Amino acid sequence: MNHLPRQFDYIVVGAGSAGAIVAARLSEDSRNQVLLIEAGPEDKSLWSRIPLGFGKIIFNKKYTSWDHQTEPEDAINGRQYALPYGRLVGGSSAINGLVHVRGIKRDYQEWVDAGAEGWGWEDNLPFHRKYESDHRGDTPLHGAHGPIGVERARWQNPLAEAFIDTASQYLGTPKHIDFNSGDAEGSGYWDLATHKGIRSSTSQTFLKEARKRSNLSVITDSVVLKINFDGKKAVGVTYKHKDQELSVTAAREVVLSSGALLTPKLLQLSGVGPAALLKKYGIEVIHDLPGVGENLMDHFQVGRKYTTTSKYTFNSLMRTPLQQGFRGARYLLGDRKGPLTIGASMAGSYVKTSEHSEDVDLQLHFLPFMPGDQGWDLANFSGFRLGMYQGRPQSRGHARITSADPFAKPSYTFNHLSVEEDRQVLMAGMRLAGKIAAAMPAEFNVKEIDPGPGADKEDDVLLDYIKKNGDTAFHYAGTARMGSDPLAVVDTQLRVHGVEGLRVVDASVMPGELTANINAAVLMIGERGADFIKRARS
């Protein structure tokens, strides 16, 4: 640490899904001296390599932060819940559920309509192709030479096939489709961000190669306290490592990639944000930017629970230590095609919840396990869940500092279900899921545990269940959104409005949610952000 240079060309704050890509790509130019600062430790856990290991690492507070939670949410009966995220090199790409979907064409058109000109499906497609090494090979839709492996679920079984067949028949839509084609209505197995059954995180792909270069420095366990400005130009950062408070300068740019929860916090602490909020806590206003921390959004997920006599659930296959040992040995020594190779979801459907829906508006997940009482441990019976969330929820909230102290927890409000459309889509999705499960083949003896078929008869009963049981999908986004209106924070090249030398490259810049787990889009944002920065130098 004492030998670290004090000046770099670029400083990237946050070594997660996007930040790792930005730092790695910038280091490809030998002229650039790049510093990547990560608050968490190195990615050294075995559970971050094994796909199913997400169920272990997500509860390990060494690698996953559980320090933040929501304010009481009025529309969900005043409930609060935790907001975990990856706090290690690789960020949430090292701990997430691995389902790899880009979203649909309509999602990105809504970004364009909201002011993100040049961020439509066709604009973004080359950058999705750039980062991926897809199981389909090199095609107009998919790339074959990027660092991130993308595979179809390597464990496929009769229970999952029964869900796919039944959903396809009930909905009247195709099966075994390419969910990453942009036109995704139908059912099938998910693509996962894995290569030969091993997680493809940015720490183990982009950074593993980039760290061989002498012009990239990576420091861990170091919390950035503020961005330093000379007038309205970002010139570096101050960070804390152990008991030392240190400053480094950036001759060209500072890049914030701390995620939608922490990027607005750092902007506000540094004097870029709503002037009234900053003055309230005695922070010098560098630039009054009222949209910083606004537009906070997430997918609100809920689902139905079932028992089954099928032997193809985790509860049946991995109930005893002997079974777990056998499956583990097969994974480590064998073909890596067993149940340890799947993530948070195995198969699913993109559906229209109403005949009036212009496009798919709900993502339905088949999860072949029933958790017990403690985290992701297994219940003592064979079961599965049908989980879901609305693709493009309209509810919006905000993220705001509560003190000038960099270690004070911000306030987060999502306002989930505060918009009637959001409530209607989830209720329709729950009813669709119930009908699909009821139509599954009799041989699997599927019986509902929660909420019970009677809940579908009354809107009030069903909505109450959703309010009491819904939770975050960990898809936080939007708090430094792209656009040109007064509440936009960055322009379409991700430069922060009103200041120089500062960009945001992470999920914060998304104007709207996607009909997708968002990590694929964050990887794309990382590639595009790096490309903008490299073009600015050349």
Image (tube, helix red, strand yellow):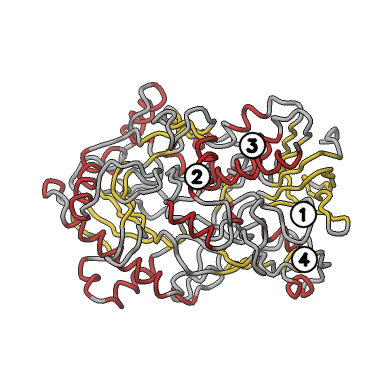
Relative side of 129 to 32, left or right = left
Instruction: Give the mark nearer the N terminus: 1 vs 2.
Output: 1
Q: Residue at x 35, y 41 (%)?
A: 178
**Pointers 4 and 1 in contact (CB under 8 A)?**
no
Which residue in the protein does label 4 denote? 404
Which residue in the protein does label 2 denote? 520
Amino acid found under the numbered disc labelled 3: Glu
Quick one: SS at disc 4?
A: loop
Disc 3 crowd rating (10 Å Cα; few below 14, some 14-19, many 20+) is some
Instruction: Give the mark nearer the N terminus: 4 vs 1.
Output: 1
Relative side of 428 to 495, left or right = left
Q: Nearer the viewer, residue 2 or 290?
A: 290
The image quarter containing residue 434 is bottom left
Q: Nearer the viewer, residue 225 or 29?
A: 29
Image mark for residue 275: none
Instruction: Give the mark nearer the N terminus: 3 vs 4.
Output: 3
* Inter-mark Cα distance, 2 to 3: 22 Å
* Inter-mark Cα distance, 3 to 4: 28 Å
Which residue in the protein does label 3 denote? 42
The spot of residue 308 in percent (x, y) is 20, 49
For marks 3 and 1, give the one nearer the viewer: 1
